[in-house]
Amino acid sequence: MHMLRTSLLSALLAILLSGSASADILATDTCDLCIMFGGTLKEDTYPEYDHIPEEMLPKNLTCAELADIFSSAFPDGSDKMCYDAVIEFHYECCEFETSTNQCEQAVHSSLLGDDSDYSVDVVPLPLNGKQFNVGVGMEYFALTSIDIVAGTAEIFMSIQMTWNDERLRWDPNEFGGCFNTLFRASLDLELTNIWVPPFDLLNRDASLDNLPDAYGIVNSRGDVFWSRFGSVKALCFFQGLERFPFDKLRCQFFFFSTASNIPIKYNIPRNLTFLGTGEDASEDEIRRYQEFSIVPEKSGIEGNEDSSLLTCTFVFKRSSRFYVLKIIIPTILFTFLTFGSFLLDQRVGERLGFGMWTQMTCFGCIEFCLGEIILLRWW
């Protein structure tokens, strides 16, 4: 059981983020690899699963051997772990009479066709449910810009949301074996095919509506996974500017539900993740020309008591080496040079000129650097 539980790390990300799992997944007696989806097992086929470590699941197993493992490990076919394990090898080990596109077309027609009463305006709140659970995950990719004068920060990130919509369930055995499909998902009611959580940025300079639309992945249990990528720009009350150029700026992004009358609880199953932060040499070369860099250990996401407001905190460290080499060190050197005028004889006419030259050169260097600053990361 432990071996199979760990091997499911490569299952749909929606399962990772889901705030609540649906029960009564499939009504079969045992966990069968293909029969539960209405297919025929290709017994002698060797599926590819190199992404699963060998200590968790032995290599070079046939579909028949995998089917035996699943049926013995999960006596109950309605077990959620059974479903997660089966979908890993579903397409490679099973043969169906209906093609995938025909199956998905039939699912769309059944769930959202002319005879369907599905409404994108209605929250899929479970029967007798007091609140609706939505899983939220965020990934940081890059800092697009920081405008200290305007008090804004723009970050390229991904926002991933998962929830369960009971109205989108279907039995794969009745439609030809497909266990997931795509639906158009958008905050614009004119563009979406399914209900999506009313989620936006509170201190926004631009709404999340401006993020590119993306399809939602829906499986046969009604679990929806919706991921969007793009730039998110927020108004910030920067903290830490007094330590320039060794400052670490702190900016908070507040995410909330735009529909206060809907009892939505936003769950955070994992903390903010950071991608492309320059931890290896190749990424460091790509991200070299940037004045600010993220401080992952001081950044994160947390929710309030009722999980209706999510606070995403970003801390950025300024690349101070440019200022040290181009402003601080030259200023110190020229300051010491000014004392050289006291070493000259008072009768030498160049004494005053030397002092004025060093001072003007010092101020000229500072003025040039401040006016022509190149946002360059030096390490």
Image: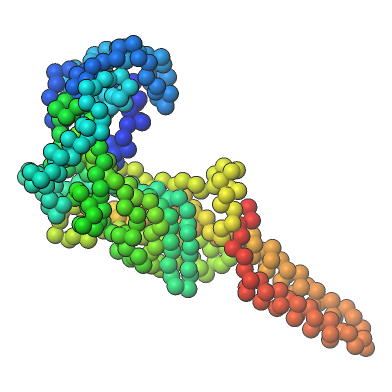
> Left or right: where does residue 237 sit relative to residue 118?
right
Residue depicted at x 17% and y 43%: 165
Q: Name the quadrant containing residue 53.
A: top left
Instruction: Name the spot of residue 260 as percent of width and height, x first.
Output: 17, 61
Q: Nearer the viewer, residue 289 or 296?
A: 289
Instruction: Name the spot of residue 105 as percent of width and height, x first.
Output: 20, 37
Task: For residue 185, say whether it is visible.
Answer: yes
Residue depicted at x 30% and y 60%: 209
Instruction: Note whether 71 is above or below 112 in the view shown.
Output: above
> Left or right: where does residue 142 sit relative to residue 128?
right
Quadrant containing the N terminus is top left
Q: Nearer the viewer, residue 371 or 64?
A: 64
Instruction: Name the spot of residue 36 as percent of width and height, x first.
Output: 18, 22
Q: How many numbered discs sit on the rendered protein? A: 0
Q: Name the quadrant containing residue 39.
A: top left
Task: For residue 160, say whether it is visible.
Answer: no
Q: Name the quadrant containing residue 224.
A: top left
Residue depicted at x 84% and y 76%: 340
Residue depicted at x 31% and y 35%: 12
Q: Nearer the viewer, residue 289 or 348?
A: 289
